[in-house]
Image (cartoon, helix red, strand yellow):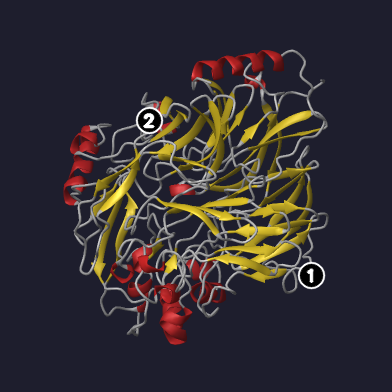
Amino acid sequence: MDAHSSTLIFLLGVLLAGCGAAQPETADWPVYGGNGENTHYTTLDQISPKNVADLEVAWTFDTGDSFPGSEMQTNPVIIDGIMYATTPRLQVLALDAASGKELWRFDPTDGAVSSSRFRHRGIVVTQDRVIFNYRSRLYALDRLTGEPIMSFGKDGWVDLREGLGRPVEGLSVSASSPGVVFEDLLIIGSSVPESLPSAPGDIRAFDVNTGALRWSFHTIPHPGEFGYETWPPGAWKVAGGANAWSGLTVDVENAMVFGATGSASYDFYGANRVGDNLFANTVLALDARTGERVWHFQGLRHDLWDRDFPAPPVLVTVQRDGREVQAVAQVSKTGHVFVFDRLSGEPLFPIEERPMPGGGMGGEQMAASQPFPVLPPPFARQRLTAADLTTRTPEANAAALKTFEAYSTADPFSAPDTSGTIIYPGVDGGAEWGGPAFDPETGLLYVNSNEMGWLLKLVPQSDESAYAANCASCHGADRAGTGAAPSLLGIVQRTSREHVTSAIREGTGTMPAFAVVIGRRATEDLVNYLETGIDASAAKVGKTPFDLPYRTALFDIFLDHEGYPGVKAPWGTLNAIDLNEGSIRWTIPFGEYPELTAQGIRDTGTDNYGGAIVTRNGLLIIAATTYDRKIRAFDKLSGELLWQADLPFSGNATPSTYVVDGRQYIVIAAGGGKNGAPSGGTYVAFALPEWGG
């Protein structure tokens, strides 16, 4: 079937849908991503291209749980008229999905106030339970009451730090994305620190009823396992990362689970992990029952740029030589789409090896070449030159040019160094964790993309204070924060000494646990400094297996002098990619800066986080844009804007759609907080005016 035939079939479906197709009384959004294939696709058709402009707010729910810098990235799960979601501080909610009325709430902190920034994208609802992660704890809650199920793990939770072959003390392990359920297994990836020390990113299966560990796949191979030789001997004992942080996708029919992993820790210098570092930056296909490897594809060898795969694989069906092929599609931060035969792992479009520039800091050994798909074409720009810098104003161009010349980067894959480099496409994509939506009617894959560079500079480690040696690379030498981590100014006053001490010792989110590295005395010195601003620490950090000769001095978005991206617009795009032909069907700028729009500067695009949903009857619905606080609906075939509405805060999440009592809703988490945007904690549901059938 060619693309024209697919379009005709789609149009016929729209006509039939408009001729009285029955609307279900109840329809769920049962899992993260909408379905097991993770396609974000729905056949619900009450909301259509003809009436989408009539959408209105049906209800809102303020979690009352936000704080400056907080985010809310949850894709809610809706089952039997109940919506399950999380708050910025990772309380779990059950709401009446038709009214937004709170039914129950679970607080894993027992009321303790925390200002830790969590990035949490969803939960698992299965059988009688809700399964979610808070820091290192994997909880099972009663679906009707929200109370912990005491027979799960120990007292209702499992410690994710256990079973990794490392001492639990000092490990930081959490899960920003929910797992998937296959038979009686909960299969889940993890979030671990991107600096050292870091836990290994094992993909694990737990008994969904008891919490017992059933199998583990070692993403940093142990002796005798496939890929062990791609790391230095003994790396499995101390190396970290290579984790499927963005989530997993399950193929129930073929009893397979698919994941896409991140980079090895530490991200930007790898002389202590010489080799290709399998299974970092890898698309993995595993036997869902046993965890055994079926096939793999490593998209980036020995990553030095934090270019991990940012979203879980998507299970698609494509046309090849007149027949349907079960496939898996994987988007990347570099703006590429890889497409593989789902069962064999054979690429469906050619992949070529391109030589790398070489170089690197002392002891570094870059990979000689890297793989790039020939088709589809990249959906993000691939190389940054002086001609690609912003022309928003002459002053902006001059500021961007000054930075560009100071951070001269000969090749997009130049190794990080002490002079500074520009990573482009940046570490936030290209594609990001929201992932693509796939339309099986037309074979189109929809990807929202960021178009920003990132600045990176390394400096030699030195005998510094506890803060300078361990914290400044992420939070800045002045404690004011960077693009990688929030400000620590006043953190003790906003929370408590106990909270800050616990975060340092145990880690939080992507921050590693420092208990083993710096010890009790240095921890006390560090908390004193954060409270008083007086750094009296001698902080002679002892040599450990995690010591490296370089650390990050700067890691932030490449901006002009007024805080806008230093490259030419568009700064964010929305793309429709034909997976049958390997072509880009359309690309449009995505998002605006309101203050620039007021000046007549439109269609700039903005950075965007969160994904789209696509409907059989012709809609592509997405929020995601950071600064204009909009949710939008587009014509999925042309990219024409059909509807938009304001949100109280930016909707950096993926919407869900469902039906209760015959009425279709679209709900989005509006949490903001990304890249300096205001933070909130509101769920907003839209529907057509009272539906009468």
Point out residue 147 in the picture as x, y percentages from the top left corner. Answer: 79, 63
Q: Quadrant of residue 687?
A: top right
Badge nearest the viewer, 2 or 1: 1
Q: Which one is in front, 479 or 456?
A: 456
Specify whether 500 is left or right of 96.
left
Q: Residues within 10 Å of mark 1 (few under 14, many from 20)?
A: some
Q: Which residue is mark 2?
A: 604
In this picture, is 615 found above or below 434?
above
Is there CB contact under 8 Å for labels 2 and 1? Answer: no
Q: Secondary structure at mark 1?
A: loop
Q: Quadrant of the C terminus?
A: top right
Specify whether 488 is left or right of 407.
right
Point out residue 301 in the picture as x, y percentages from the top left corner. Answer: 34, 56
The amino acid sitting under disc 2 is Thr
Q: Which one is in front, 317 or 43?
A: 317
Circle number at residue 71: none
Point out residue 64 in the picture as x, y percentages from the top left corner. Answer: 66, 52
In this picture, is 586 found above or below 176?
above
Q: Residue at x 51, y 66 (%)?
A: 218
Point out residue 402 in the picture as x, y percentages from the top left corner. Answer: 18, 45
- Can see residue 461? yes
The amino acid sitting under disc 1 is Met
- Can see residue 586? no
Specify whether 195 is left or right of 442.
left
Q: Residue at x 33, y 77 (%)?
A: 547
Q: Gap between marks 2 and 1, in whole Å?
A: 52 Å
Q: Which residue is mark 1?
A: 150
